Image (cartoon, grey):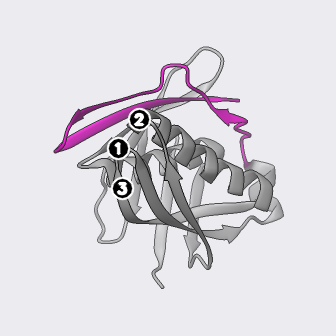
Amino acid sequence: MFKHLLYFDRSNVVALMKVDRMIVRFEELDHTADSGIRAFGRDQAELFVNAAQGMMSLIFSGMIDVSPGLRTDFHITGDSIESLLREWLSEVLFIHNVKHVYPVSYRVNSCSPTHFRASVYSLPMSDDMRIGATELKAVTWHGLRVHGSPARMEAEVIFDT
């Protein structure tokens, strides 16, 4: 298994600290009523993982030292890359809300514009984590878009809060 130190910062930058360097993965979008993110990736797999990390940063802001142990496997299909991204984020949000876990690591097994297969590694949420968490109710279709080239992709997602 792997160990990560994750730091989620609501000031528009997330850092995955594995080798003492910061990598911009997503940013928070200003939205009048709900919450949103813009995620970046060199390819579809990285974009989907960064979008999931961005969504989780809206729920919980802070630093946690973790060795994730709970694994959930997903095989998602969709008509388009946008529907696939929405379904993926909805599934990650579902396991967070229903199983009361905090997804911290993601392993993509395969992906295309119409299918996505990945494993999510989570840890049980403590009472302190639940108290400090912001509730996201759903991943919306409003403003959902994925664009870019095969070498650099970008997505915008709005969440119902």
Residue found 31% across the figure and 48% down from its top: 44
Q: Amino acid at mark 1?
A: Pro
- Disc nearer the start of the sequence (2/1): 2
Image location (x, y in percent) of residue 89? 56, 45
Q: In the figure, is residue 62 to the left or right of 11?
A: right
Q: Amino acid at mark 3?
A: Cys
Q: Nearer the viewer, residue 61 or 109?
A: 109
Q: Which residue is mark 2?
A: 80
Residue found 30% across the figure and 68% down from its top: 20
How far apart marks 3 and 1 lie (CA) works out to 7 Å
The answer to the question of whether label 2 and label 3 lie on touching residues, with beta carbons closer than 8 A, is: no
Residue 28 visible (yes or no): yes
Q: Which residues are magenta?
A: 133-161
How far apart marks 2 and 3 lie (CA) works out to 12 Å
Q: Is residue 142 magenta?
A: yes
Secondary structure at badge 3 equals: strand
Q: Which residue is mark 1?
A: 113
Q: In the figure, is residue 138 to the left or right of 24?
A: right
Q: Amino acid at mark 2?
A: Ser
The answer to the question of whether label 2 and label 1 lie on touching residues, with beta carbons closer than 8 A, is: yes
